[in-house]
Amino acid sequence: MSRECDEVHTRASKCGPHLRHRFDRGAATVQEEAQGHVRRRLAAILFAGYNRLLPGDEADNFASVTRLLCEIIKPQVLKSGGNIIRWTGDGTLVEFDSIIEAVRCAAALREAVSQSNQALLPERRVALRMGINLDDVIAEDGDVFGDGVNIAARLEALAEPGSVYVSEIVRDRVAGRIGFDFEDLGPQNLKNIAQPVRAFRLGDEIAKRSPPLGNTGAVARVNSLVFDARRAIAVLPFVNFSGDPEQEYFADGITEDIISMLAGWHAFPVIARNSTFIYKGKSVDIKKVGQELGVRYVVEGSVRKLGRRVRVTAQLIRADTGHDIIAERYDRDLTDLFELQDEIATTIAGAIEPELLKFERD
């Protein structure tokens, strides 16, 4: 390992997963600013968070993250003209003078990590999430603080693996100038941020999705090769069996999170939410769903709640035969609803991909 990577290893091991708590030191910093010790500047902030998709040995996890920092994140940030403010075992804070370069860097990192994951076993893959914001930041001793940084960090925490979330001001500044589209996620209540922040998910390159005039036949052939129907997967809306209407949101949230996680890993083509939610509330024939959506695999499940306990079931089914490949049940205490939703979605998605890969190999 190079000297730079050794330095990353040392600094990250000392910092551990405690980066985000430093983003909330607003009151003390403002007081210091009044005394002339700090200054403000406008900056584009990118916060990248990373962790292993599946739990593993601590040393092995740390080695994966260190490789991500040294081989992917740092070279791309430097190439894009960014300045790495700090990095630890679970996140990297980067400052850019140009918001356009910040978004382009995020898109390049997303693609690079996706390609890197394809060469790794599922249990060794790393999830990369990114949040981007443009705002005033408070600069002090080579570090930056304030809501400009906080919002980027909160957007990263909100994002699913493999995705980039940006604030509305970022979308407004770069829309039509970078060749990517954006999905409106609506106003989001972010921790320690007084007003809701409208968030957007960075989509695909428009050029890759828009067929050139006069060449539609060639594009159709390319798209048919990219979307491999033999391996495509559809996640049907999870059914709420609890009789509690409040759990409808929980069931939908788990479904959406599983779709996002599987899509972020790029191991298999995943049918979009809008296409699968047309089956919500309906009794479906799995074989018919497979034919209508052009998929080989279907995930379906249910949610039951009793008191402070919740039970989630999930089945991975081969659509053409209707046979179960895996069927799992998850019983949990109903404490923090969003934390529980994330845990179950991650567990289910983490169980699905290795089974699919094994099934395809067999």
Image: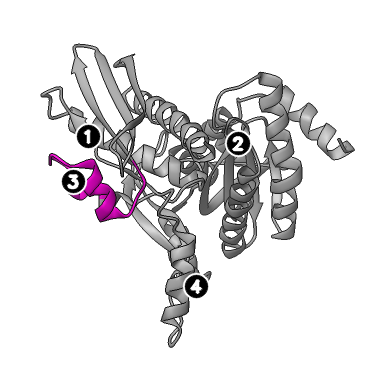
Element at badge 4? helix
Mark 4 neighbour class, 10 Å CA radius: few under 14, some 14 to 19, many 20 or more: few
Q: Which residue is mark 4?
A: 207
Residue at the image position 65 percent from the left and 46 percent from the top: 116
Residue at the image position 41 percent from the left and 39 percent from the top: 193
Tell me the CA gap for discs 4 and 2. Answer: 28 Å
Mark 3 neighbour class, 10 Å CA radius: few under 14, some 14 to 19, many 20 or more: few
Q: Is residue 159 visible?
A: no
Residue at the image position 46 percent from the left and 56 percent from the top: 202
Element at badge 2? loop
First in sequence: mark 2 vs mark 1: 2
Q: Which residue is mark 3?
A: 279
Element at badge 1? helix
- Determine contact: label 3, label 1, CB under 8 Å: no
Q: Is residue 338 above or below residue 299?
A: above
Between circles 4 and 1, the one closer to the viewer is 4
First in sequence: mark 4 vs mark 1: 4
| View extreme (left): residue | 243
Element at badge 3? helix
The reply, left or right, for residue 249 in relation to residue 108 is left
First in sequence: mark 3 vs mark 1: 1
Read off the magenta span. Answer: 276-297
- Kind of residue sitting beneath label 4: Ala
Tell me the CA gap for discs 4 and 1. Answer: 35 Å
- Kind of residue sitting beneath label 3: Tyr
